[in-house]
Amino acid sequence: MNNVQFAFVDEYGNYGFDFEKNDVSTHFIIVAILVKGSNKESLEEKVEYIRQRFFQAGEMKSSKIRNNHKRRSLILSELKDLPFNIFAYVIDKRKIRENAGIRYKKSFFKFLNRLLYDDLFRIFDQLELVADEYGNKEFMEEFKGYVKRKSIPDLFNFSSFGFNNSKSNILIQLADLLAGTIAKGYDKNQLTDEYQTFYKILEKHIVRIEYWPKDYRNFLVQPSKNENNPPYDEVILKQAVNLAYQYIDSSGNSDDIDEKDRCVLQVKST
């Protein structure tokens, strides 16, 4: 099991499109904490130590930090040198058209299930998914059922899906903390200028943040970081990003190993 990749998955946000209500999130965020099997035990021990230090007897949850940005920065700084990576989806629900079928709850969750599943299993030949077994998180309940139907292990394709109670699985709590932290950069109810500080602390851990609906503007470089470069052509950039995604969508499910590698390179280059 030391060579197996683990993905500890949690979410931020909820279903709903009445954005005038304070309890309706503008974004739905999914975070997978990626951990190598060889690092899992030591990571659990170190994160548990951080939990005890900052949360005492309680769970390590983003909601318990709320808007105490200094405390959040301290916790993230304690995590920054630990062996894990972050794979995240940021869905801006405001950009989903009012007449789109995906606005129906069942279709909304089914679409997200397929999006996350296809991406994770496209990239990782061996992956053990772990999600919160209890609670009222609708997406996670739907996702677990989706994966169980899709992932049937055989002699040639190892895959498994584990169920863990958040109270007994510290890395699920880590996923909760980081999903809530990413929300600070996007959701209207959570936005703070301090997000840039949080992002810089976590940056080396982030292997991918996938935005949906896909928007080329998410790939615009910061001019202050590229003062010596000539101005980019926004039309060319938009076309390049769209072509990259078209290639991934058309080729990502290929069984050809070289084709899979090219898709992964497309992901990394964008």
Image: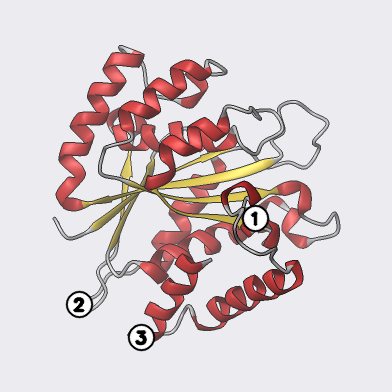
* Location of residue 84 in the rendering, given as x and y in whole percent from the top left corner: 30, 45
Q: Quadrant of residue 164?
A: top left
Q: Are marks 1 and 2 in contact (CB under 8 Å)?
A: no
Residue 218 is labelled as: 1
Residue at image location 27% in from the left, 37% down from the top: 81
Q: Is residue 223 left or right of residue 195?
A: right
Q: Nearer the viewer, residue 230 or 141?
A: 230
**Amino acid tagged 3:** Asp
Q: Are marks 3 and 1 in contact (CB under 8 Å)?
A: no
Q: What residue appears at the point 28 percent right and 22 percent down from the top-left corner?
A: 50
Give coordinates of residue 19: x percent, y percent: 80, 36
Q: Is residue 245 left or right of residue 264?
A: right
Mark 3 or mark 2: which is in front? 3
Pointer 1 or 2: first along the chain: 2
Q: Considering only order in the chain, which callout, 1 or 3, is on the residue closer to the N terminus?
A: 1
Amino acid type assigned to the residue bearing label 2 in the image: Leu
Image marks 3 and 2: residues in contact by CB distance under 8 Å? no
The total number of labels drawn is: 3
Which label belongs to residue 258? 3
Label 3 and label 2: CA atoms lie apart by 22 Å
